[in-house]
Image (tube, helix red, strand yellow):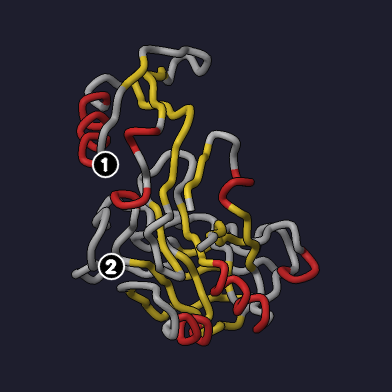
Amino acid sequence: MKYYKFEYNSLNEKETGTQFQCADGYIGDMQRNIFPMEGKIEFEFELPIPYMDKKAKSTTLLNFIPISYDFMVLKNYFIDFIKNYNIGEFQEWSIKVTHNKTYYQDYSLFILNYPKQREIVDFRNSSFYLGRYSDYKFIGQNICVDSYDNYLSILEVLGENEDNFLKCSKIKLDLSKVDLDLLRLSNTPLAGGYYVSERLKKEIEKQRFTGFKFVAIEEMDSRIQVKY
């Protein structure tokens, strides 16, 4: 089954009203390093309050720039809609959205609890090398990565030197055994974010939900290879 990157359509201003719907707002705890990399969020935290630009239009997916790509701001009716598909475990928190001195009360902060990079990223057939923050053009030694756990260990070791980081020249995604309609990749070079199956994409387009764009994985970046 084919998959598509599922993200905000910043160029369709006729639909969204402006390129950046919510560039400002109350951030709450969204930029604190408190959220687990995977699993349920079992604690209370300060929720964000997006401030919509005066020209912005209310869309199904709302673009709130200060939050990470692990979260989305979605209309409640859309979350109810995708519950009918195979999306795995998720959490939602009702939030307020301000617009021209009024509030929208029908949006929620949404996250899929279990990202799938461990199962989907083929680290053995991806390519990594040593990079330096002080010299963007620096190409260091190749670094072999054979699993997601190994990838995390390497990041930890490289983090001991403030100038070193892991760069990726090729990443391979293996979706041949995946049957989810919505999935999230996190802590993944080049390919982080949300993805939808072709069948869910077609239904979203059929229902004319707004604010979305879909990009086929093989068209995202020449460094990304995909196996279906």
User: Residue sitting at 45 percent across and 49 percent down?
Assistant: 192
Instruction: Give the SS element for disc 2.
Output: loop
The span from disc 1 to disc 2 (Cα, nearest Å) is 28 Å
Residue in front for this viewpoint, 68 or 142: 142
Residue 221: mark = none
User: Residue sitting at 65 percent across and 69 percent down?
Assistant: 211
User: Residue sitting at 29 percent across and 49 percent down?
Assistant: 118
Q: Which of marks 1 and 2 is in front?
A: 1
Residue 163 higher or lower than 34, as above or below:
above
Picture quadrant of residue 201 = bottom right
Apparent side of residue 146 relative to residue 71 in the rendered image (left or right): left
Apparent side of residue 125 relative to residue 25 in the rendered image (left or right): left
Residue 148: mark = 1
Q: Whole-percent x and y of residue 220?
A: 60, 45
Q: Whole-percent x and y of residue 175?
A: 43, 54
Instruction: Give the SS element for disc 1.
Output: helix
- Which residue type carries mark 2? Phe
Residue 45: mark = 2
Badge 1, how many Cα within 10 Å: few under 14, some, many 20+? some
Q: Whole-percent x and y of residue 142?
A: 36, 17
- Which residue type carries mark 1? Tyr
First of labels 1, 2 by sequence position:
2
Apparent side of residue 35 relative to residue 175 in the rendered image (left or right): left
